[in-house]
Image (cartoon, helix red, strand yellow):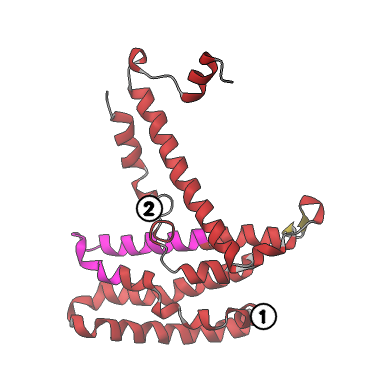
Amino acid sequence: MKLDRCKAYTRRTGWLRNLTWKNPVVTSALSLPFLVVSTYSLNSAAFIAASMVLVSLPVLLLRRLIGRRIPAPFSPVFYGAVAFAALMAVRWAGEWLMPTVFSSMGIYFYLIPMNSFLYLTIDHWEEAGSPGRPLRFALWHLAGFVLICLLMGLVRGVLVGGAFFQEELFGGLSFSGAYYPFFGFVLLGMIAGAMRWLHRVVLVVLLRRDQPKEERRPLLWRRRMKRGEW
């Protein structure tokens, strides 16, 4: 059995793995409180995602430029101070542009500089070989967080409000339970399962195409139909 198609699929979609089935939020539950609590609407999800990006980027860029000059014991203190300084600027902008959404964030907004996602990325910075690879690794992880955050905010906002950009859905019916953190856990689990399932389906299809027809085993539903179970 050949694996040419599977290898090509892995090679061509390698840059997508941090967004989909290798997403740090999906696989490692990084920054979980921001997702299950703060993504009750698309506006809140966009605000927390933008805040995460604006706080993380200065830290990642400084890590790339002067990371080797900072002793390891002082690294968390230095990058923590940089993150909190960036957070104060984001706080001023949030209070001015989106005061209602900002006030609803509560303590979770101030926990952004201490999130596990940011510091895990910094700790693994030295593992990559080329100078630009760690920064790309960190940016793809950040993009993965933003993707899941916006997706959860969109789904929960539609279910809570019963509308999508002022267009009523489901006859105007709404599901208020989507507002609570418990539903955030459920939705995140469903997204993780869907991503893993889709990745496995693609691999199975590619493996069957590479396998000679005489060696292929019929799919489960075809075997059941042949035995008369369906």
Q: Residue at x 35, y 12 (%)?
A: 214
Numbered range of the magenta stretch: 121-148
**How many C-alpha atoms fall within 10 Å of the one at disc 2: few (<14), some, or many (≥20)?**
some
Whole-percent x, y for residue 217 in the image: 39, 19
Whole-percent x, y for residue 141 in the image: 38, 61
Q: Residue at x 43, y 19 (%)?
A: 218
- The overriding secondary structure of the stretch rendered in magenta is helix
Helix or strand or loop: what does disc 2 sit on?
loop
Taking depth in this image into account, of 207 and 91 the one nearest to the observer is 207
**How many C-alpha atoms fall within 10 Å of the one at disc 1: few (<14), some, or many (≥20)?**
few
Whole-percent x, y for residue 66 in the image: 23, 78
Disc 1 target residue? 100
Relative placement, left or right, of 154 versus 218 is right
- Whether residue 67 is situated above or below residue 137 in the rendered picture: below
Pointer 1 or 2: first along the chain: 2
* Amino acid at dot 1: Thr
Magenta stretch holds residue 204: no
Disc 2 target residue? 22
Whole-percent x, y for residue 46 in the image: 57, 68
